[in-house]
Amino acid sequence: MGDSEVFTSVKSLQKRLHKDSENSSIGFFPTMGALHHGHIALVKQALEENDIVVVSIFVNPTQFNNPDDLKKYPRMLEKDIELLNEAGDIVVFAPEVETVYPKNYEKLNIDLGKLGETMEGEFRPGHFDGVMNVCKRFFDIVKPNRAYFGMKDFQQVAVIQHMVKVTKTPVEIVVCDIIREESGLASSSRNVRLTEQQKEEALIISQTLNFLKSIVDKYPPIKAWKKAKQFFRDGNLELEYLEIIHPNSLKRLDTKWVPGAHACIVAYAGEVRLLDNIQLVPFEEK
Ligand code: PAF
């Protein structure tokens, strides 16, 4: 059982981080709270790989383009801290909005090109601008050696890697596998909003991805995509998008598979927006 310390101001957090020796490595995991076992798996990995682990819990308003989604986003700080204590000694940063975005805050503007236009970029305009800015702000405050991101947000990882490269931020981005419930449903903070029936129905998401993977050898991407969309229609969810993409450029694949080809999907179970992804083709061995 750990003993997590909670900080709300930049000054107190930095003072705590400077208390340890300069050579202590810092692992940082940015979250919006409502932690679940998927987060905890990642926290445990960070604890193994670093001397200090900082977890931020901050529901970032600038990455929500739907005010209702922001309002309904689950907030449960005390429960989150209890869960973190089960993982170990964690330095928790839980700032207010004014702390993250003070009056003199200067927004970072980076052209994300295709990375920001497709999929989440198309359906949630401004979303990645908000994500990129809050992560850069946290990186500047925490100055981590490593920052941990879950593969479930595949496009978010691509955006963060791009931002870190462009801004020359000295941090290693560690990408962690998708954690799933036993049923196959990708773990997500939003899952607490699902009824038992919706949880059951949401399985069509991972089933569609697995189906897609199983037909890669039979069809070119465009045909496989059509078949997968048909498969998805057997379920009860509303599809927002299903894309088969190049793993780096995120451009849609039509006629030819490439190493690392990936599929991303977003669907609604009632009002709850769920996303998932899968690697369809292995990368070539070097
Ligand atoms: O993935 C998330 O939970 C958020 O986008 C992040 C990275 C914590 C930024 O607010």
Image (cartoon, rainbow, N blue to C red):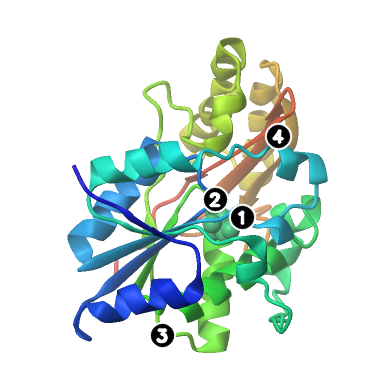
SS category of the residue bearing label 1: strand
Q: Residue 256's spot in the image, x, y percent? A: 60, 55
Give the Cα separation between the discs numbered 3 and 2: 23 Å
Q: Nearer the viewer, mark 2 or mark 1?
A: 2
SS category of the residue bearing label 4: helix
The numbered mark at residue 226 is: 4
Q: Quadrant of ligand 1?
A: bottom right
Q: Quadrant of residue 266?
A: top right
**Mark 4 belongs to which amino acid?**
Lys
- Quarter of the image that includes the N terminus: top left
> Which residue is tagged 2?
32
Lower sequence index among marks 4 and 2: 2
76 or 49, nearer to the observer? 76
Lower sequence index among marks 3 and 4: 3
Q: Residue 213's spot in the image, x, y percent? A: 48, 37
**Mark 2 belongs to which amino acid?**
Met
Pointer 3 and pointer 1: residues touching (CB < 8 Å)? Answer: no
> Which residue is tagged 3?
170
Give the Cα separation between the discs numbered 4 and 2: 35 Å
Asked if the residue at label 3 sits under 8 Å from ligand 1, the reply is no
SS category of the residue bearing label 2: loop
> Which residue is tagged 1?
245
Lower sequence index among marks 4 and 1: 4
Lower sequence index among marks 2 and 1: 2
SS category of the residue bearing label 3: loop
- Quarter of the image that includes the C terminus: bottom left
Give the Cα separation between the discs numbered 3 and 4: 42 Å
Q: Residue 51's spot in the image, x, y percent? A: 20, 68
Q: Residue 95's spot in the image, x, y percent? A: 55, 62
